[in-house]
Amino acid sequence: MEKLYEGKAKIISPSDDPKILLSQFKDDATAYNAQKRGTIAQKGEMNCRISGALFQMLEKQGIATHYIDEPAPGQMRIKAVTILPLEVVVRNIAAGSLCRQTGLEQGTVLPFPLVEFYYKNDELGDPLLTRDRILILNLSSLNQLEQLQSKALAINTHLKTFFSRCGITLVDFKLEFGLDAEQNLLLADEISPDTCRLWDQSQTDPKARVMDKDRFRQDLGDVETAYQEVQARILSQLETTSS
Ligand code: UDP
């Protein structure tokens, strides 16, 4: 199949319709700016199904996404967008780089959701941005930045509630947004255990509770099982709410 773009976790191909692209989710896993590489069996199919289910849930809540449908396992039809060069991270609980950079203890519940913007730039190691750095680098207008902030917070509210019903704590996650031909701002990329920190509410042990890519990053084992469990809980929660 012809490729438009190949990233670390997905291959994007054209379709007959220039407004529609095909995203093929890969089993490849990378961490630490691709210094650690591996594969997670069935990850592509699981992340595609998980992302698809979450995009559908968010659409029902009025959040515009690039999601169209899933023609085959591991494949998602998406609306063509130009991806903004920003990663939008939302945090409810301190973990990862927030702890490394601020000294906050892992697991500290934040007094309000923290929205952060990172520069999508592998050569620079995806640095943390400030509002003024974004404006000076022309990565977004102030108006668009405010839209991104409020969309990210709304998405956090919906995802947090949904994951909580699955017995999962949403610690933090990364979003990407894009603009379609009409300049509509759409939620894009994926929402999966690759891009979220998810803690099992039935486990107290800090290692046992991890249901996301930290199992791969930190060599905790049982990565596939954790992803399978996230998928099973999400799909069964969706069945409960739709019936
Ligand atoms: N994240 C991501 N892609 C990235 C960087 C971060 O999906 O390139 C996600 C990560 O999985 C976590 C959240 O964003 O859910 C915050 O990541 P953090 O800044 O703590 O970075 P890390 O500890 O992974 O270096």
Image (cartoon, grey):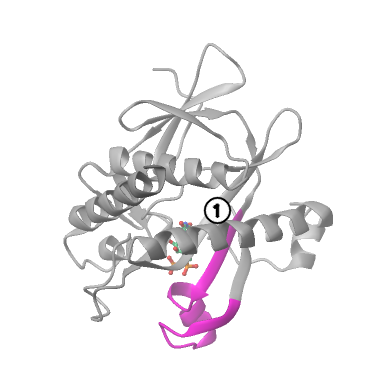
**Can residue 84 be seen at all in this image of the molecule?**
yes
Can you give x and y, in whole percent of width and height, for residue 175 in the image?
A: 55, 53
**Can residue 8 be seen at all in this image of the molecule?**
no
The residue at the point 75 percent across, 60 percent down is 134
Q: Is residue 240 left or right of residue 162?
A: left
The residue at the point 53 percent across, 11 percent down is 16
Q: Is residue 142 left or right of residue 152?
A: right
Can you give x and y, in whole percent of width and height, for residue 217 in the image?
A: 30, 64
Q: Is residue 118 above or below residue 176?
A: below
Most foreground residue, 235 or 107: 235
Q: Which residues are magenta?
A: 87-112
The residue at the point 25 percent across, 81 percent down is 204
Q: Label 1: which residue?
A: 175
Quadrant (top left, top right, bottom left, bottom right) of the N terminus: top left
Q: Is residue 14 left or right of residue 26?
A: right
Q: Secondary structure at mark 1?
A: strand
Quadrant (top left, top right, bottom left, bottom right) of the C terminus: top left
Residue that lies at the very extreme toward the top in this rendered image: 16
Q: Is residue 203 above or below residue 224?
A: below
Residue 34 forms part of the magenta stretch:
no
The type of residue carrying mark 1 is: Leu
